[in-house]
Amino acid sequence: MDIFTQQLINGLVLGSIYALVALGYTMVYGILELINFAHGEVTMFGAMICLAVISAIASSGTDANGLLIVSLGLLAAIAVCVMLGFLIERVAYRPLRRAPRLAALITAIGMSIVLQNTAMLIWGKQYITFPPLLPLVRYDIGGAVITNLQIFIILLSCLLMAGLLVLIRKTRLGRAMRATAQAQDIAGLMGINVNTIISITFVIGAALAAVAGVMVSAYYGLAHYFMGFMLGLKAFTAAVLGGIGNIAGAMLGGLLLGLIESFGAGYIGTLTGGFLGSHYQDVFAFFVLILVLVIRPSGLLGERVVERA
Amino acid sequence: MTLLSNQWNAWRHDRRVVWVSYIALGILLVLLPFLTGETLGRGWVRILDFTLLYIMLALGLNIVVGYAGLLDLGYIAFYAVGAYAYALLASPHFGLHLPFWALLPIGAGIAGIFGILLGAPTLRLRGDYLAIVTLGFGEIIRIFLNNLNAPVNITNGPQGINLIDPVAFGNFSFSETHTLFGVTFPGIYTYYYLFLILALLVIFVSLRLQNSRIGRAWVAIREDEVAAEAMGINTRNIKLLAFAMGASFAGISGGLFAGFQGFISPESFNLFESIIVLCMIVLGGMGNIGGVILGAVLLTIFPEALRYIGDLQSYIFGRILVDAADLRMLIFGLALVLIMIFRPAGLLPSVRRRHEFGSDASILAQEQASLYDTRR
Amino acid sequence: MNAPSLTKWTLWLFVLSITLTACSKKEETTTGTTGGEMAVKIGQVSPLTGPQAHLGKDNDNGARLAIDENNVSGVTLGGKKVKFILVSEDDIADPRTATVVAQKLVDQRVAGVIGHLNSGTSIPASKIYFDAGIPQISPSATAIAYTAQGYKTAFRVMTNDRQQGKVLGEYAVKNMKAKRVAIIDDRTAYGQGLADEVEKAVKASGGEVIAREFTTDRSTDFLAILTSIKGKKPDLVFYGGMDAQGAPMVKQLQSLGLKAKFLGGDGVQTAEFLKLAGSNSEGVTASSPGLPIDSMPGGKEFRKKFTGRFGTIQTYAPYAYDAVNVMVEAMKNADSAEPARYLAELPQVQRAGVTGNISFDEKGDIRGGAITLYQVKGGKWEVLETVMGGATGMGKNK
C-alpha cells in the first residue's frame, strides 16, 4: 500500500509539471491552431535564467535567505521568458499566420532548434546544478515519503491553473481570448485587437513555462540546454490527451500522463506477467493516448471537431 | 528583359532542347560521383548516397502528407522496420542470409503492413491528433526495437545489429571495389548507381500515382474528406493505401540503408529523423515531386556544408570566433525559420498550391481549413 | 516535373558541377611537407553538438593536449620533424553521420583516428577505417562488438563491458556484501551492455538480482522505478549509465528513504557526478578502467595541465590523451606515420599512460584491463582498490 501511495505522489508531482507546460501548448493551439514546438525550449530558458541569476547572487557572497534568492531567480526567469514568448510570436509565427499550417509547424521546429543552440552557446554543453538553497523537509505518510518541495510544486501548480481558469472564464481579457479562439476575424470586427490578444496568450504561456522550468530544475536539481525537448513532447502529449485547445483538458491530461507514467513504470511488469518491464513506460503512455483518441478522437475534454459540410 | 524571357521560354519549350536536357541531365547524374569524388572527396559521395536514400524516403512521406494530407510524425518507424527486416534476414544475428532480390520486397511488404497497422485505428483522427498518434507510434516502434533483446533476443536491443550483408546480386557485391573498362568504381560509387536507379523508379511511381485515379482520390480526401466520401470514394481504403504505399517506400530505403551501412541500431530511428524528413517535404514544396527532391537534397547537404563554417571564419576573420560545430545547428534552425517565412508554400510549390496563393488569400482562407491549405 | 522546368534544373545542375570541378582539389597526403616540417593529421571524432556535447568536447580536449605536447617536445619520423595536426569532427552521436565523417577523414588522409566516443558510432565507422587501412583507437567505446568484428585496425584504451561488468558484479557481491541487487540501465548500448554483464557476474558470484529496471539517457525522473525497487528491499542498486542520470537518481533514492548502497560504472565515476549530486554523493561507489590517474607517472601533471587549460575533466579526456600518445609511440617505433607501417607496431606498444599501463591483446582490446574502484568520501572520489585482470574480451559478439 505504501508503494501505491508513493507512486501516486510521484505521479501527481510529475503530472503537475506536465500540466503547467501543457497549458502553454493548449492556449496557443486554442487560438492559433499551431503546435508551438518551441514551448519546451521556453521552459528550458526559464530554468537557465533562474539558475544564472541564482548563481550570480550566491557567488556575490550574500547570506540572504535561500527562498528569497530563488524567488528573485524565478522573477527574472518569468521576465525573460515573457519577452522571449512575445518575440517568438512576433518574429516566427506572426508572418505565417495566413500561411499553410505545416509551414508554421516547421518554423516552430526551427525556432526550437535555434533556442536550444542559443542556450548551448550561452550556458555551455554541461549540466548545470541547482544549488541546494531550499531546505528539504521530508514527511512520512504511511510509509510513503513526500517532501516540502513536492507539496509546494503541487500547490503552486494548482494555484496557477485555478488562476488561469478564472482569468479565462471570468475576466474581460479571458472573454476576448475565447472570442479570438472561436473566430479570429469576427473577434476583430467586435473591436478586439486580435494581435494583442495573441501576444498576450504567448506571454501568459511563456510565464507559466518559466515557472515550470524553475520548478523542474529545482526539483531534479539540474538543468541542461536539451531538457526542454522531452519535457515539451510529454506536455504536448498531455495536452492532446486532455483535448488540445481546452484549458481544463490540459490540466487533466497532464495529471493523467504523470500518473500513467508513474504507475506504468511501477506496475507494468506485474500487469504483463514480467514480459514487459519499465522500459516500456513510454509505450504504455502512448498506448493509453492512442486508446483514448481512438475512442474519443478529440481527447478527453476536447470538443468534437465539426465536420465541414 | 521581357523579350529575353520570352525567347528563353520559347527556347526551353522546344522539343529538341528538352531532349538535349534529358540527355545532359542523364550524363551529369552518371558522372556526378566522379565529379564530387575528385573535387570534394569521397565523403561527399557518401553524402550523395544518403541524399538519394532520403529522396526515396521523402517521396514516400510525400504520398502520406503531400498527396493524402495525413500529417505523419512517426514516419521514420517504417524506415526502421525496413532496415530491421533486412538486417535480421541477412546477418549473422539469426544466421540467415537471404538474397537481396528477396529482401527488398519483404522489407517493403512488412513496412506496408505496419503502415496499415498504424492507419487502421487512426482513420477517424484528423490533423494534429493524427500527428501525435503517429509520433507515439514511431516512438513505440523504436522502443520495441531498443528493448526486444530480452526475454527472447530478437533485435539485439541497443547494441544494434552488426555485420549485415552488403547489397549483392549473385557474386557482385556493391560494397567492393570493381573495375569496368579500366575505370575503378569504389563501393560507394556502385551504391550510388543502385540508389540512383531505385530513386528514379520511386520518382516514376510517384509521378504515375499523382495523376492516377488513386492520386486524385487522395487529393480529394485531402481537400475535403466529407465531399470525397459523397463522391463515392472509399475513404477508408484510400487512406490505408496511402499509409501502406508511403510505408513501403520507407521500407525499401530502410533496407538499402541497412545493407549500405552494415550496422544498424535503434538510435538511428529517433523522432528527430522523422521531423527532418517532414521538414524536407514542407521546405521543398509539399505535393510537388521536384520540390520534395529539392528539399531532400538541401536538408541532407546543408548540414554537411555547414561544417565548413570553421574554415570560412578563419578565412574572413583570420581565426575561429565560435566553434563551428556549435554554430551549425543554430544556422540550420534559422534557415528553417527564414525559408518558411519567405516561402511559406515551400521553395517549389505544387501547381495547385501556387494557384491558391496567387488568388485572393483571404477568401480562400475562409473556405479552407484542411491541413494542406491556408488556415482560416 | 514538367519538361520546361527540367531544362532549368539541368542548367542548375550543370552550373553546380562546373563549380565543383572548379574547386581545385587540395593536395592532401599523410605526410605533406611544409617548410621542412612534415604534417601528420590525426582525426578525432566525437559528438560536439547535441546532448552529449560536453563529453565529446572533453575527448577533443584530451586529444588536443596530447597533440600539442607532442608538437612541443618534438617528434622526428624518418629523419623529418613532425608537426601533428588534430582534425576534429562532429558525429552528433549518430551512426549515419559517423560513417560520413569517417569517410571524410579518410579523404583527408589522416594517419589515424582517435574515436569515436560512442560504441554505436565507433562500430559503423570502424568498417570504413578498416577498408582504408587506417588505425582507430577509441578512448571510450565499450561495446564488446567493436573489437569482435575482426578488423585489425580497431583498438581501444578503454575496457570493454565484459571486463568492467565482471569486476563490478563480483565486487558488489564479494566486497560490498550485497545479496539482493537491483540493476537499472539507461537502454543505451553502453548502459545496457554494462548492466547485462554486471547481472551475469552478480549471479555467478552467488548474488541475487531482485529487480531489473530501466530508464532512458534523457530522463530526470526515476521515482517510479526507484519506488518499485524499494518495495523489493535491495542491499545494493547498480546503475549502468551516465552521471547526468546517476546523480539525480542518487538524490531521489535518498529522498525516498531507500537505504541501499549505490554502485556505478565509469559513466558515474566523474567530477560532474560529484557536482550534480552534491552532498547526496557521499558513499557512492563507482569504477573506472585503468589505474588511478594521480598514481601514474605524469598523471598529476596531466591533471594540472588539463584543468589549467580546459577546466574540469569530464570523463574520457585522459583516455583520449593516452590514445593519442599510444598512436604516436607506435609511429615512433615504426619511424613512420604511414598507416600501413605503424599499424604493425600498434599491437606491440607498451606504454605507461595516465590511465594505466596500456597494451593491446590480439583483438585490439586493452590487455589486463585493470579496474579501479572509487568511493565518494568527503565530497571526493577516493581510491578503494584496484582489481587487476578483469576477464579479457573473449567470446563472440552477442
Image (cartoon, rainbow, N blue to C red):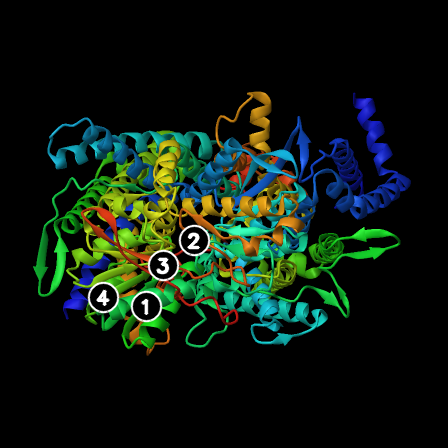
Closer to us: A169 or C288 = C288
Q: Which circle's residue, 3 or 4, is located before the other in the chain?
A: 4
**Which chain is home to disc 3?**
C
Instruction: Look at the numbered discs 3 and 2 and tell me whether their residues touch, using CB distance below 8 Å.
Output: no
**Which chain is home to disc 4?**
C
Closer to us: A227 or C153 = C153
Closer to us: A185 or A14 = A14
Report the amino acid beneath label 3.
Answer: Ile
Report the amino acid beneath label 4.
Answer: Met
Question: Which residue is most to the right?
Answer: B16
**Which chain is home to disc 1?**
C
Task: Find the distance from the CA under tag 2 to the CA under tag 4.
Answer: 27 Å
Task: Find the distance from the CA under tag 2 to the CA under tag 1.
Answer: 23 Å
Q: Which residue is mark 1?
A: C169
* Residue B114 horizontal/vertical position (percent): 54, 68
Quick check: do tags 4 and 1 share a chain?
A: yes
Q: Which circle's residue, 3 or 1, is located before the other in the chain?
A: 1
Q: Which residue is mark 3?
A: C371
Viewer-side label of 3, 1: 3
* Residue A224 horizontal/vertical position (percent): 34, 42
Instruction: Look at the numbered discs 2 and 1 and tell me whether their residues touch, using CB distance below 8 Å.
Output: no
Q: Which residue is mark 4?
A: C176
Q: Secondary structure at mark 1?
A: helix
Report the amino acid beneath label 1.
Answer: Gly
* Residue A156 horizontal/vertical position (percent): 17, 45
